[in-house]
């Protein structure tokens, strides 16, 4: 049996990468599938969109802060005759305290007296001036949104025919809204606030809304966490709740030692005794002391 020679027709065929492995595996693309010019055009379009978006955000932020400043000024500059009178009386009280000094009864060595003693001195001064000024203490429980807290402030109650008008006096108003590491726009807004606020509850409610909205915007722009004690609901609880009114201290009264007995008042005048003894034969009834 003769050996038959068998030839494989596929042996002469050469295997190349171009025949079996596409160029996409190495990260290359054919020029006809994706041109360099089209890639550069897409990059320029994305950059333009980002620039337009940033410009839009900047203009929106600028418009927001300008509107907040306008609202703040309009709210602060409006005032009533009652608010002006109480504000002037508060200024007079503070001026007197600066000249005389605060007699701190709680023995806290603080320059200018502690907050509690200053409030009491101002309350007494306003009461002397004819205003029904009281010290109020607001207290609220914790919730899912805000923690528990308390706050003490002054309030002037002025009853009228329609309804009772309440004027709030906050001695550290500006400090209540200051935030560390805040933005320049927010700091400029806070500088417009008075250090001492004297105004009706309705005015205070509007200011709280403006300032809390500004603080929320500030935290968002700086990508910072909004603390719960900076929230609108927490700030409202400080002044707009139902507070406890501190009663004024009763005037001191003199109490006598029960062991001491008062001398009994004589029923007759002492002038008649010598007269009866020295003049014989003179008889007269004693004069009773009424």
Image (spheres, helix red, strand yellow):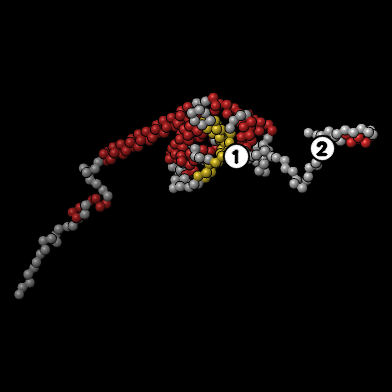
Q: Earlier in the sequence, mark 1 or mark 2?
A: 1
Q: Quadrant of the N terminus?
A: bottom left
Task: Give the residue furthest to the top.
Answer: 81
Question: Comparing marks 1 and 2, which lies closer to the viewer?
Answer: 2
Q: Position of residue 165 (x, y in %)?
A: 51, 31
In front: 9, or 141? 141
At a point 33% along the width and 35% down the height, the residue shown is: 48
Looking at the picture, how far across and down is residue 131, in whole percent?
59, 30
Residue at figure coordinates x 49%, y 43% from the top left = 229
Q: Is residue 113 left or right of residue 146?
A: right
Quadrant where the C terminus is found in the figure: top right
> Can you tell which mark lies on residue 10?
none
- Say which residue label 1 marks: 247
Q: Which residue, given by chain and number where applicable, does mark 2 sit on?
A: 267
Task: Please identify the quarter of the rendering in which residue 65 is found.
Answer: top left
Q: Residue at x 85, y 34 (%)?
A: 286
In the image, residue 91 sits, relative to residue 143, either above or below, namely above
Q: Taking 115 as reference, is 37 left or right?
A: left
């Amino acid at each position: 049996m003769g050996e038959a020679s068998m030839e494989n027709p596929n042996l002469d065929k050469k295997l190349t990468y171009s025949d079996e492995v596409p160029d996409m595996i190495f990260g290359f693309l054919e020029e006809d599938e994706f041109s360099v010019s089209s890639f550069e055009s897409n990059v320029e379009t994305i950059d333009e969109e980002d620039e337009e978006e940033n410009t839009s955000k900047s203009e929106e932020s600028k418009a927001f802060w300008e509107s907040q400043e306008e609202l703040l000024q309009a709210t602060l500059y409006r005032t009533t005759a009652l608010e002006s009178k109480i504000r002037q009386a508060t200024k007079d009280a503070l001026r007197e305290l600066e000249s005389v000094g605060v007699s701190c009864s709680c023995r806290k060595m603080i320059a200018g007296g502690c907050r509690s003693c200053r409030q009491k001195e101002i309350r007494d001064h306003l009461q002397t001036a004819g205003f029904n000024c009281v010290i109020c203490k607001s207290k609220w429980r914790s919730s899912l949104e805000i923690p528990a807290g308390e706050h003490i402030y002054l309030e002037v109650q002025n009853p009228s025919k329609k309804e009772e008008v309440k004027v709030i006096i906050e001695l550290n108003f500006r400090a209540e809204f200051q935030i560390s590491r805040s933005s320049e726009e927010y700091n400029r807004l806070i500088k417009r606030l008075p250090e001492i606020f004297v105004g009706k509850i309705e005015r205070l409610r509007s200011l709280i809304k403006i300032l809390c909205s500004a603080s929320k915007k500030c935290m968002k722009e700086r990508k910072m966490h909004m603390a719960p004690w900076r929230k609108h609901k927490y700030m409202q609880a400080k002044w707009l709740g139902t507070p406890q009114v501190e009663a004024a201290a009763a005037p001191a009264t003199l109490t006598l030692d029960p062991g001491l007995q008062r001398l009994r008042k004589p029923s007759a005048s002492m002038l008649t005794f010598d007269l009866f003894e020295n003049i014989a034969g003179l008889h007269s009834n004693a004069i009773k002391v009424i």
